[in-house]
Image (tube, helix red, strand yellow):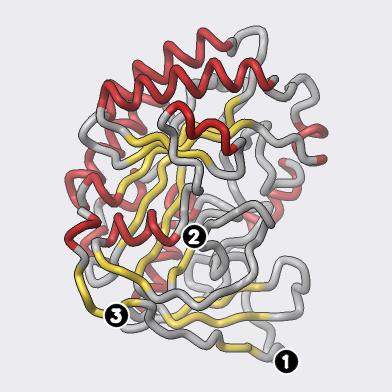
Amino acid sequence: MIIHTGSRTDIPAYYSRWFYNRIKEGYVLVRNPYYPEQVIGYQLNPKVVDAICFCTKNPEPMLDRLHEICEFQQIWFVTITPYGKEVEPYVPDKEKVMNSLKRLSKEIGARRVHWRYDPVFIHEKYTVDFHIQCFEKMAKNLSGYVSSAVISFIDLYQKTKKNFPNVRVVTRKEQEILMEAFAKTGEKYGIAIRTCCENKEFAKYGVDVSGCMTQQVMEKSLGYLLKVPKSKSVRQECNCLLGNDIGMYNTCGHGCLYCYANYDRKTVCINMKQHDPESPLLVGVPKAEEKISWSKQESYCDGQLCFDLF
């Protein structure tokens, strides 16, 4: 099975001590975000966990202790965008994040590191030309250190509209211009361009439109095939292997205005104050009367390397 850490919060950036404690203890507990009274337990055992998938805007806090998870296969998605502090107030300097990504890539290999340039939105400051120029500058810097770049355009969830009222969708014409330019840049610097839940017609530019965290992406990162049981997708148009996420909504400290995982800053601050690095839960501690439902975990790996994936 795959353990995810980043669909709900940024564990590497803010909760690395807690995560390493969970690795040491060999298990983690997670509250169901829709039914908080339900607590799910996962074993953190490389015999049943085929890979841990990290999504982060700042891998730096994890890097000095990577040797503690060397028994686990890792796949990293590092988000680096060109936005300023007025949009991403607590995200570290982008040059610093790129340097951290390079260090990570040297540790685990470029095929297991993916760059996310998303979400893309248009603003009087962040124009189409601005994105094209910044993407090429970043791609040049990251060339040889990442396997792919994931592009997606902003979705205006209600939370996003509330926290970021001045943002607007990217028009179809703007999307076409951007995707064609991103594809040319990716080809120039040896970086595969992927989208997720975007227009399939972008394939005409040489873009992989099958998804960003699909079984095929996971297999290519790991270097072997996976036998994954069929399950219902989180979103109908999404082919990605999601689920089994150990994070919690409303706990990410970056404060990005476009974030779908945080309701507001006040809620985040309250939750972060309740975080205990020694607890098996990300926020709070288990109650004595709570029953834990342990996930049925099994390896998806058939033990056969596939050299065609390299």
Residue identifier under label 1:
289
Instruction: Give the quadrant of residue 285.
Output: bottom right
Residue 235: x %, y % from top left? 68, 56
Q: Nearer the viewer, mark 3 or mark 1?
A: 3
Residue 122: x %, y % from top left? 64, 17
Residue type, numbered disc 1: Glu
In which quadrant of the rendered image does the N terminus lie? bottom left
Q: Secondary structure at mark 1?
A: loop
Residue at 51% x, 62% y: name it: 241
Nearer-N-terminus badge (3/1): 1
Apparent side of residue 69 relative to residue 289 in the rendered image (left or right): left
Apparent side of residue 105 relative to residue 230 in the rendered image (left or right): left
Camera-nearest residue between 288 and 120: 120
Residue 280: x %, y % from top left? 52, 76
The answer, for residue 285, to whether it is visible in the render is: yes
Residue identifier under label 2:
5
Instruction: Give the quadrant of residue 193.
Output: top left
Residue type, numbered disc 3: Asp
Residue type, numbered disc 2: Thr
Give the Cα separation between the discs numbered 3 and 2: 24 Å
Q: Nearer the viewer, mark 3 or mark 2?
A: 3
Camera-nearest residue between 13 and 103: 103
Q: Residues within 10 Å of mark 2 (few under 14, many from 20)?
A: many
